């Protein structure tokens, strides 16, 4: 299923829309339903016009055994096509959290640095940031 991500309609980077990727050193801890699913000191901070800052984490810092890839994709004119994963947790019978994490396997050149880094919806995941 392919849909368009919710972004301002400013064309291909024109009209003042910006996406800036900055390497960070903050300690990022992500929990879902009380379970730690990721910890990193190597986040990429993505600052995008009209969006909250998003923390993209290297896949090595995410416990991918707790997730299953889905068929969901979205297209962002400023980053490319995103792929999604559902949180399945460590125990069977737990609450599934569909499409809670995403990554850009083939981002556009302007944000190539985020390739395969994962970001979490903070409406489901608790993202803690420590300096």
Image (cartoon, grey):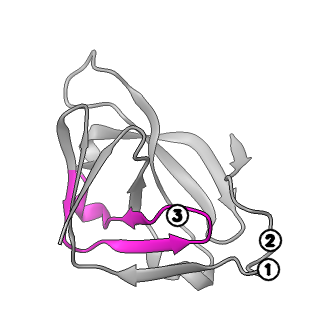
Q: Which mark is residue 123?
A: none
Chain-order first, disc 1 or disc 3: 1
Q: Residue at x 31, y 62 (%)?
A: 59
Q: Which residue is mark 2?
A: 10
SS for dot 3 = loop
SS for dot 1 = loop
| Left or right: where 128 falls relative to 84 | left
Chain-order first, disc 3 or disc 2: 2
Q: Give the number of callouts.
A: 3
For the residues labelled 3 and 2, the Cα–Cα distance comes to 21 Å
Picture quarter containing residue 39?
Answer: bottom left
Which quarter of the rendered picture does the N terminus lie within?
Answer: top right
For disc 1, the neighbor class at 10 Å (few under 14, some 14 to 19, many from 20) is few
Chain-order first, disc 1 or disc 2: 2
Label 1 close to label 2 by CB (< 8 Å): yes
In-front residue for pair 1/41: 41
Front position among marks 3 and 2: 2
Which quarter of the rendered picture does the C terminus lie within?
Answer: bottom left
| Left or right: where 68 falls relative to 58 | right
Q: Which residues are magenta?
A: 38-62
Q: Which residue is mark 1?
A: 15
Picture quarter containing residue 42?
Answer: bottom left
Label 1 close to label 3 by CB (< 8 Å): no
Q: Residue at x 50, y 73 (%)?
A: 47
* In the depicted structure, whether residue 87 falls above or below residue 25: above
* Residue 20, image x, y percentages: 52, 81
Q: Which mark is residue 104?
A: 3
* Residue 72, image x, y percentages: 59, 42
């Amino acid at each position: 299923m392919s849909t368009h991500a919710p972004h301002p309609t400013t064309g291909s980077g024109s009209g003042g829309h910006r996406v800036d990727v900055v390497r960070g050193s903050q300690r990022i801890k992500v929990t879902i339903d009380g379970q730690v699913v990721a910890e990193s000191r190597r986040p990429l901070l993505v600052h995008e016009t009209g969006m909250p800052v998003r923390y993209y984490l290297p896949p090595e810092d995410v416990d991918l055994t707790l997730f299953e890839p889905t068929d969901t994709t979205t297209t962002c004119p400023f980053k490319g096509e995103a792929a999604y994963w559902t949180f399945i947790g460590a125990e069977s019978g737990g609450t599934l959290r569909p499409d809670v994490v995403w990554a850009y396997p083939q981002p556009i050149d302007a944000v190539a640095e985020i390739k395969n880094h994962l970001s979490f919806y903070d409406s489901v995941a608790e993202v803690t940031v420590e300096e």
